[in-house]
Image (tube, rainbow, N blue to C red):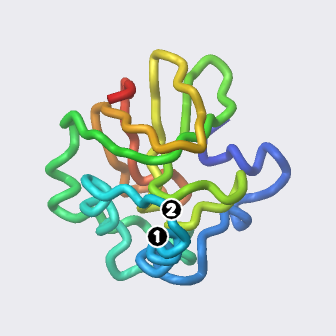
């Protein structure tokens, strides 16, 4: 099963891969106002992947990968966020979100606030912030796939 078909496998379909209708900055600001910690660091660079697009409609648009993001390819990058496992036979896949998950299928900050995590070791899903380091990669050819991946990720 392709990872982008994760939701479809559960009979939900990708249109339900819900993103907040408001901008990522507005959504993250509201989370901060509610007392939730929103990680900064490399996320501030990755947020530029949707420049010129609305995260709520980005399902059909290709991500716009800036030069700053392209420079990170192949580099060890540390991202801090909230971790959720993705069921995948034979692989250890996780989703790291800059904002806390408020339900299993909604990601408040849009796809520029998500990173697919591939790890050789089991990583514990938690509602607490976790810092992960791995080899950074991005994709800009499939509008239905995750924009960013950390390969060989480990707890920082």
Q: Residue at x 57, y 22 (%)?
A: 91
Give the image location of residue 61, x and y in percent: 47, 71
**Residue 86 - label:** none
Judged from this view, the residue extending furthest toward the front is 35
Q: Is residue 109 left or right of 49 when viewed as pictured?
A: right
**Residue 32 - label:** 1
**Crowdedness of circle 2 by 10 Å Cα count: few (<14), some, many (20+)?**
few
Image quarter for residue 119? top left
- Closer to the camera in the image, 12 or 83: 83
The residue tagged with tag 1: helix, strand or loop? helix
35 shown above or below 87:
below
- Closer to the camera in the image, 152 or 142: 152
The answer to whether the residue labelled 2 contacts the one labelled 1, judged by CB atoms less than 8 Å apart, is yes
Q: Is residue 57 left or right of 155 when viewed as pictured?
A: right
Q: Residue at x 52, y 52 (%)?
A: 145
Which quadrant holds the C terminus? top left
Give the image location of residue 84, x and y in percent: 60, 40
Q: Residue at x 59, y 61 (%)?
A: 107
Which residue in the structure is indicated by mark 2?
Answer: 36
Q: Residue at x 60, y 70 (%)?
A: 19
Give the image location of residue 135, x and y in percent: 28, 32
151 shown above or below 20:
above
Give the image location of residue 144, x and y in percent: 55, 57
154 shown above or below 94:
above
Which quadrant holds the N terminus? top right
**Crowdedness of circle 1 by 10 Å Cα count: few (<14), some, many (20+)?**
few
Q: Is residue 65 left or right of 95 when viewed as pictured?
A: left
- Closer to the camera in the image, 35 or 17: 35
23 shown above or below 70:
below
């Amino acid at each position: 099963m392709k990872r982008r078909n994760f939701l479809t496998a559960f009979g939900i379909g990708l249109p339900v891969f819900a993103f907040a209708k408001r901008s990522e900055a507005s959504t993250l600001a509201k989370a901060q106002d509610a007392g939730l910690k929103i990680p900064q660091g490399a996320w501030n660079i990755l947020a530029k992947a949707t420049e010129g697009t609305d995260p709520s409609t980005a399902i059909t648009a290709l991500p716009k990968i800036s030069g700053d993001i392209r420079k990170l390819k192949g580099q060890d990058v540390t991202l801090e966020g909230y971790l959720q496992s993705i069921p995948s036979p034979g692989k250890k896949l996780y989703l790291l979100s800059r904002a806390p998950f408020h339900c299993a299928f909604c990601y408040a900050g849009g796809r520029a606030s998500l990173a697919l995590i591939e790890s050789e070791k089991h990583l514990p899903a938690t509602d607490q912030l976790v810092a992960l380091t791995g080899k950074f990669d991005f994709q800009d050819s499939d509008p239905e796939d995750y924009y960013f991946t950390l390969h060989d990720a480990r707890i920082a």
